[in-house]
Amino acid sequence: MQINPTILRFCQLRLIVGYLGERSQFAWWPTAFYESTSRPFLEPVFTKTSRLAQYHGVLEAARRLHDEHLNVGSYHLFRLPEEIEQDLHTLVQSGVGPEFSIQVPMNQEDALGSLGRLVSEIPKDGIGPILIGNIKDLEMLEIASDIASAYLLAFSRNVKTYPYLGAAGGK
């Protein structure tokens, strides 16, 4: 299975930021889908798809928080164009192949380290909404790096940020 590097990067970002945003880490949203007790709770109901249920639970909580702080029509890590959303869902659902090395971090330190490895330059500074770029530039891996950068700095300063991409018509 050949994986688009941009899709892989956004999936990694979602899992890492999703984990860090949960209540036992930085408490940006009140979920506990990635805590150790979650899978045994989900598996009887979602026998073959508990991993996907965790992913979508965190995705929805993070999406709601970001949507509350951003304008309608803007895109962010947890709300991307529909075709990208479908690709991300398929990637998490499949979870197969040697290149599928996406794992939910085991602790906060590992998660922050993984997030730091996705940053390629000086972290983007800011609190609240931060315009990272334009949705038409989504395929550029630098966009994912800039988003990772904004989250890394926010988590390290214990503040909230909402990096977003503007509509295709302008910045």
Image (cartoon, helix red, strand yellow):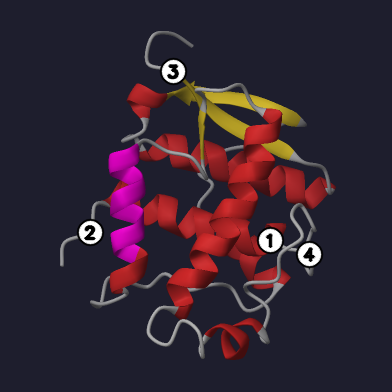
- 69, 158: nearer the viewer: 69
Q: Residue at x 42, y 36 (%)?
A: 142
Q: Is residue 148 left or right of residue 81?
A: right
Q: Earlier in the sequence, mark 4 or mark 2?
A: 2
Q: Residue at x 35, y 55 (%)?
A: 88
Q: Total of numbered circles in the picture? A: 4
- 43, 132: nearer the viewer: 43
Residue 167's disc is 3
Q: Is residue 164 left or right of residue 26?
A: left
Q: Earlier in the sequence, mark 4 or mark 3?
A: 4
- Give the residue type at disc 1: Leu
Residue position marked by numbered label 2 in the rendering: 3
Q: Residue at x 78, y 51 (%)?
A: 156
Q: Residue at x 23, y 77 (%)?
A: 97
Q: Earlier in the sequence, mark 3 or mark 1?
A: 1
Q: Residues within 10 Å of mark 3 (few under 14, many from 20)?
A: some
Q: Is residue 111 above or below residue 131?
A: below
Residue position marked by numbered label 4 in the rendering: 23
Name the element at disc 2. Answer: loop
Mark 3–mark 1 distance (CA, rounded to whole Å): 27 Å
- Give the residue type at disc 2: Ile
Identity of the residue furthest to the right in this view: 158
Closer to the observer: label 4 or label 2? 4
Residue position marked by numbered label 1 in the rendering: 20
Asked if the residue under mark 2 is in contact with the one under mark 1, i.e. CB atoms within 8 Å, the reply is no
Q: Residues within 10 Å of mark 1 (few under 14, many from 20)?
A: many
Mark 1–mark 2 distance (CA, rounded to whole Å): 25 Å
Q: Earlier in the sequence, mark 3 or mark 2?
A: 2
- 163, 157: nearer the viewer: 163
The percent coordinates of residue 55 (x first, y second) are 50, 65
- Give the residue type at disc 4: Arg
Closer to the observer: label 3 or label 2? 3
